[in-house]
Image: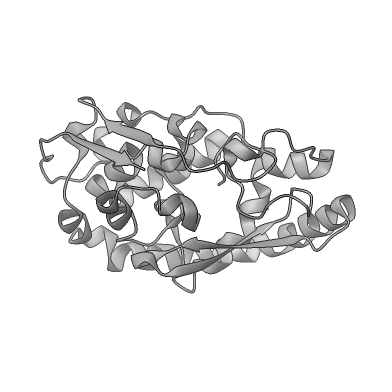
Amino acid sequence: PRPRGGAVGGVAPPRPVTAPVGHREREYQRSTEQASRHPDLTVGKRLFDLVVSLLLCVVAVPVVAVVALGAAASLRCWPFFVQERVGTSGRPLRFVKVRTLPAATPRYADKYGLSDVAIPPFPALLRRWHLDELPQLFLVPFGRLSLVGPRPEMPHLHARMARRFAETRTSVRPGCTGLWQIGAGAERLILETPQYDLFYLAHGNLRLDLWILWRTVLLFSGLGRPVELGDVPRWARGRTPPQQRSTRFEVA
């Protein structure tokens, strides 16, 4: 799902941002090496992604067709929108969505640059229910995306992240949904709220993925609220003892 909030105009010029990971998050941070060795983040996770995404793709095909036709009629342009995002290990990822913004909107405008855009009723409905994100499901069987993981970021925002944070969050497959996407921090940029991705990398396992998928359904159906890290139940976390240190990411 897409981060909530939104934008017009162009991309705002880069500005210095300090994204702290405070004392409430320090217990959640472990090394990328520890996370990548977790068995649930390798074979088990890939098998889960493959089986579930194939089933969801079958359901999504007619929905995407209807949504795309409605978007094309409303915006009077090609209904699919493609961006280049930063994928696994920093490799380029073609990120496909149903178009919900006028064709004149800057392709790489971030949420702080889009708030004044006039959106017709039907595309606005698609954004509200995140139906414009459904084409991303078709990237999961091919291994370009996971069902759950860090959101793939636009290149100019990825470049503003602290190097260690950028390398850490791209050490696993990006996801269609994830902790940041359903978290209270999604009102801001990823680089401003790094603790969500760090938590996922440190505690990632199939139980956590299932919990995130469930909370995604609740949130985007209007039955849930954005999550805080403290909302993650103990049973959904990995077993490795937390690494006790605090980190601040200086982003320029």
Residue at image x 29%, y 49%?
165
Quarter-wise, where is residue 237 in the image? top left
Q: x, y percentage for residue 154?
A: 50, 55
Q: Is residue 208 left or right of residue 222?
A: left
Quarter-wise, where is residue 232 in the image? top left
Give the image's coloring scheme: one colour
How many marks the image carries: the answer is 0
Q: Is residue 179 left or right of residue 202?
A: right
As rendered, which of 194 and 30 lies closer to the eye? 194
Q: x, y percentage for residue 21?
A: 26, 32
Residue at image x 62%, y 39%?
113
As rendered, which of 3 and 162 lies closer to the eye? 162
Residue at image x 21%, y 46%?
238
Quarter-wise, where is residue 146 in the image? bottom left
Asked whether residue 176 is in view, the answer is: no
Residue at image x 69%, y 39%?
8
| Vertical position of residue 243 compared to residue 90: above or below | above
Considering every residue shown, the one lying at the far bottom of the view is: 142
Asked whether residue 97 is in view, the answer is: yes
Q: x, y percentage for residue 221?
A: 61, 35
| Vertical position of residue 142 compared to residue 191: above or below | below
As rendered, which of 85 and 210 lies closer to the eye? 85
Q: Is residue 236 left or right of residue 80?
A: left
Please state, as top left, top right, bottom left or bottom right, where the C terminus lies in the image. top left
Q: x, y percentage for residue 242?
A: 13, 39
